[in-house]
Amino acid sequence: MFTEQIFKNLAIFLMAFGLLSCSAAKAPKGTVPTLDKISETANGGWVTFQSEGKDISGELIGFKEDSIFVLTDKKLLSLSQNNVHFARLIFYNTKAENYGGWAGLNSLFTIANGWFLIFTFPINLIVGSSVTVGESNRINFIDFPEHPWTEFHKFARFPQGLLDTIDRNELEF
Amino acid sequence: MKQVLYWVLTLSFLISSCKTAPVRREINSTDQIQYLNPENKFIKAHMKDGSVFILNFWFTDDVHNNLSGYGELLNIQRRVVERRVRTSNRDELVEPFTFPFDEVALVETNDQGNSLGGGLVFTSGLIGGVALLCLFSPKTCFGSCPTFYAETNDTLRILAEGFSTSILPSLEINDIDMLYEAKYKKDFQLTLTNEALETHSIRYANILCFEKEEHQKVFATSEGDFYVTENSRLPNNCKSLEGDCLEEVKFLDHKEYFSESDSDNLHSKEDLILDFDIEKAGNFGLVLGKRQTMMTTFILYQGLAYMGKSVSYFLAQYELGNLEKKSGILELLGGVEIYFQNRNLEWIYAGEVNEPGPIATDFNMVKIDNVPQGNLKIKLVMNKGLWRIDYLTLVDIEKQVNPTVVGPYSAENIFGKEKEPLAKLLDPEDFLVTYPGEKFLINYQLPFEHAELFLDSKGFYLEWIREDWIKEQNFRKLNQMVKNPTTYLKKIAKEYKKVEPVMEEAFWNSRYVY
């Protein structure tokens, strides 16, 4: 009875974490760092544009005059700022999924706590869900036009602007 | 439990529903370097040629207008070109990167805010710590015996644990537990579970049914007599060594009075003093709602651990009657003794209640006859750190009654191996045998409109000896435990004290509601 109830509750708990983990803005894996590594990497953020009816995604390389340079998986694209009606820049990926999984595993391990489970399970539930929701609610992106382009500059690979000395063909992910 | 879970989740959502601030990235020109917060561990110097230095230890030379530091140089592909690591070894000193401000286009710093992972590190530590405690001290966890759940007004709850000390066939006894909080229904159901690494052999599980008026309660004495009672009255006050204990004992709310064991001797007594107003002389009964702490479970499992690899031998010898059966350590710890004060202010012994088991709160009554009108002082004497008292009340005794014994009419196997559980429970020569994780529903048809219910179960159980216990084999200590329990309880006090706070707090704070 007790074990069955625990497993039922655990299932609800894991589902809740699963749902929570879906709410943060997310860039493709490996394109942006996690928050704790953001000071140690120097790539641009992951930007998604809607320009002339097309969705374009890639690393934000930099700005020059009224052009935005984005490195997609195919090539370096140049877009006119005037043609962009919406843009979202994600500068890091949250760890909500990891935390959700971590908290879920913690819950499973509470079974090893015997009777103390009735103490450790709810503590993990409160802390785990708070941490996961908190992490998934982190503002890890900025949107244009809510934020001006000058804010986007900061998260480009070259915040100083795309230099003439740089061979654009050399740029890679 | 589910309701609690939903509330906990809701609370957690509310707590964490506030958006956290975004990362703060500052881009500065070189003439602002001197104003940067030196506590920024990392600094990125974006160079005019497109490369970038990521420095984790940095400083400025304002005389020569240089920026220096250790870290990495990345090219425009953002690949590491060179890495310089700061070392404290004088012989291997590495020169830091040094470059003039003029070559730097911008300097970047990031404020990441707080990491939330610390919370999970904490819970992982807690869970891991408790798991380790269970690993190194398995006697702390997983204590059980046959557990019986019944529907109460709000949820399904453990209301009885059967024959906690019957750990061998020769120790088979019957055990009567009051189903105090059970919701009375003529079609009554108990859920029987096995939630420990044990084999339970249950000879029978009958309901003792006492017809009564709605406002009455029926309580049992330790002698096995049952009395119809009325007029429950609360104590005016409750004094203990710990201070006032009235809040803990005045209602059956799973908020219990509990003291810590004596760190020098587990066999150490304490008193609780109660007083009641008696409006009219008569015969009364002091009702105790109580259960044990984990102390007896710890000692029982410690005994099995001392037997180590020879546990089967010792238990078999005991079964065969080759070992002396003497008053054991658990008897020494004793029950809760009840005294009342007479007109000469002398304490008069009224009786004792002693229902072992740490899981379900059980109820017993001690009779106090011929009490005059006025103030009645009652003293409870019990072993320190052994009992949790949830409820103390004084009731008027109306009459002695006998039960109607109701056997089950059906038993459903929910998770279990036994195909005919009902037949096993009804056959006086046979047992319903259950294994860890098994669950059965037992149904009864009750005869009265209003009745008090008790569970009368009989049987024994076998502990599964855990590997960790065998490592503790120690015949000298076993001998001391059996032959000289008074000394043993002094010796073991400190060891028990190490685990007691965790065990007790977990149980006490959890206020087992299920």
Image (cartoon, coloured by chain):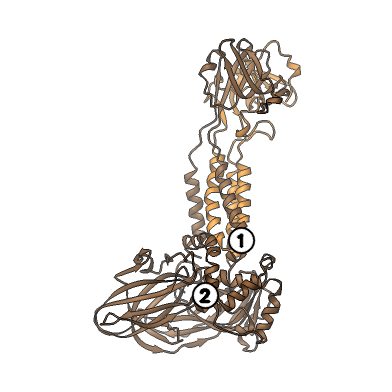
Chain colours: A orange, B brown
Q: Residue at x 50, y 63 (%)?
A: B504
Which kind of residue does numbered mark 2 sit on?
Answer: Thr
Depicted B63 relative to depicted B466: above or below? above
**Tag of residue B134:** 1
Within 10 angstroms of label 2, few (less than 14), some, or many (20 or more) residues? Answer: some
**Tag of residue B486:** 2
Nearest to viewer (mark 2 / mark 1): 2
Chain of the residue under label 2: B
Q: Is residue B250 visible?
A: yes
Within 10 angstroms of label 1, few (less than 14), some, or many (20 or more) residues? Answer: many
Residue B472 on image: x %, y %: 66, 66
Viewer-side residue, A108 vs B34: B34
Answer yes or no: are tags 2 and 1 on the same subunit: yes
**Tag of residue A70:** none
Residue B305 on image: x %, y %: 64, 70
Q: B150 left or right of B102? A: left
Which kind of residue does numbered mark 1 sit on?
Answer: Cys
Q: Residue at x 57, y 45 (%)?
A: A20
